[in-house]
Image (cartoon, rainbow, N blue to C red):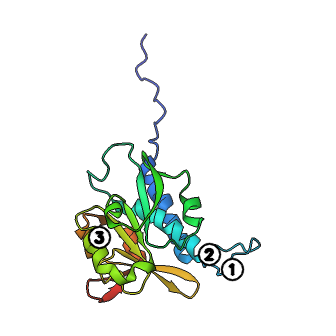
């Protein structure tokens, strides 16, 4: 006689979406970087990261909180370029941080340049303090390109940059100009905005 009831099948548990997992991990890293103090010492005995080690880690993780529009890459396997425009203050730290990293199917590469035409082909551009005399030229030079401009000089964000590093004691902080990001066609995650000092064109600022 056929069984009246079929034995219940074990419930299948859905696996966590890898994208969501990466997003949560990136968010945790950003918070840790935000809270963790840096050290001015570079001694091998010192366990605290230097200022530019922290900034290098931020540059990589900022990219994970951007909604990169279609057309950002010419091909599915094209590299994700993080570029330094002007003098490089990182030394080997940025190169070491980016080595072997990828964003999705895009390997992360480091490029150094002094030319705006080449900077337009990058996804993230760190604008060195050596370029502070030509911020308006830099902003205009990448206009229309899907480029996240990041700087470290006071007034960078209010001058049209998207993200500006600041220092509070021995902590690296950052301000964000959402209008500048929007002009580049980029949408920044609310998780990133929550940690930032919000800056507007022309210099007004406030907390998100």
Residue pointed to by mark 2: 50
Give the residue number, with chain letter if any, for mark 1. Answer: 41
Task: Pick whichever, 86 or 159, lies toward us.
Answer: 86
Secondary structure state at the residue bearing disc 3: helix
Q: Position of residue 153 (x, y in %)?
A: 43, 83
Q: Residue 49 sits in which quadrant? A: bottom right
Coordinates of residue 8 in the picture (x, y in percent): 45, 29
User: Which residue appears at 31% of the width and 57% of the height?
Assistant: 68
Measure how far apart labels 3 and 1 are at the Cα level.
34 Å
Closer to the eye: label 3 or 1: 1
Residue at the extreme right: 45
Q: How far apart are marks 2 and 1 (CA)?
A: 7 Å
Q: Name the residue under label 3.
A: 181
Element type where label 2 sits in the image: loop
Give the alpha-carbon distance from disc 2 to disc 3, as whole Å: 28 Å
Residue drawn where x is 47% and y is 25% of the image: 7
Q: Is residue 208 visible in the rendered structure shown here?
A: no
Q: Are marks 2 and 1 in contact (CB under 8 Å)?
A: yes
How would you rate the neighbour count of disc 1 (Cα within 10 Å): few for under 14, some for 14-19, many for 20 or more?
Answer: few
Q: In the image, which disc is placed on residue 123?
A: none
Q: Is residue 86 above or below residue 69?
A: below
């Amino acid at each position: 006689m056929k069984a009246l009831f079929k034995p219940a099948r074990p419930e299948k548990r859905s696996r966590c979406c890898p994208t969501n997992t990466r997003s949560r991990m990136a968010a945790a890293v950003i918070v840790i970087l935000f809270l963790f103090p840096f050290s001015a010492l570079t001694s091998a005995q010192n366990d605290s990261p230097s200022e530019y080690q922290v900034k290098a880690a931020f540059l990589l993780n900022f990219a994970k909180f951007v909604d990169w529009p279609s057309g950002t890459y010419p091909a599915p396997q094209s590299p994700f370029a993080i570029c330094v425009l002007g003098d490089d203050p990182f030394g080997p730290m940025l190169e070491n941080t980016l080595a072997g990293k990828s964003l999705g199917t895009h390997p992360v590469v480091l490029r150094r340049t002094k030319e705006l035409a080449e900077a337009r082909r990058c996804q993230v551009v760190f604008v060195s303090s050596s370029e502070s005399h030509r911020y308006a030229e830099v902003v205009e030079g990448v206009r229309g390109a899907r480029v996240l401009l990041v700087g470290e000089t006071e007034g960078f964000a209010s001058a049209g940059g998207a993200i500006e590093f600041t220092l509070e004691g021995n902590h690296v902080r950052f301000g964000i100009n959402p209008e500048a990001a929007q002009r580049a066609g980029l949408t920044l995650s609310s998780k990133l905005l929550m940690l930032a000092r919000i800056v507007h064109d022309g210099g007004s600022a406030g907390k998100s």
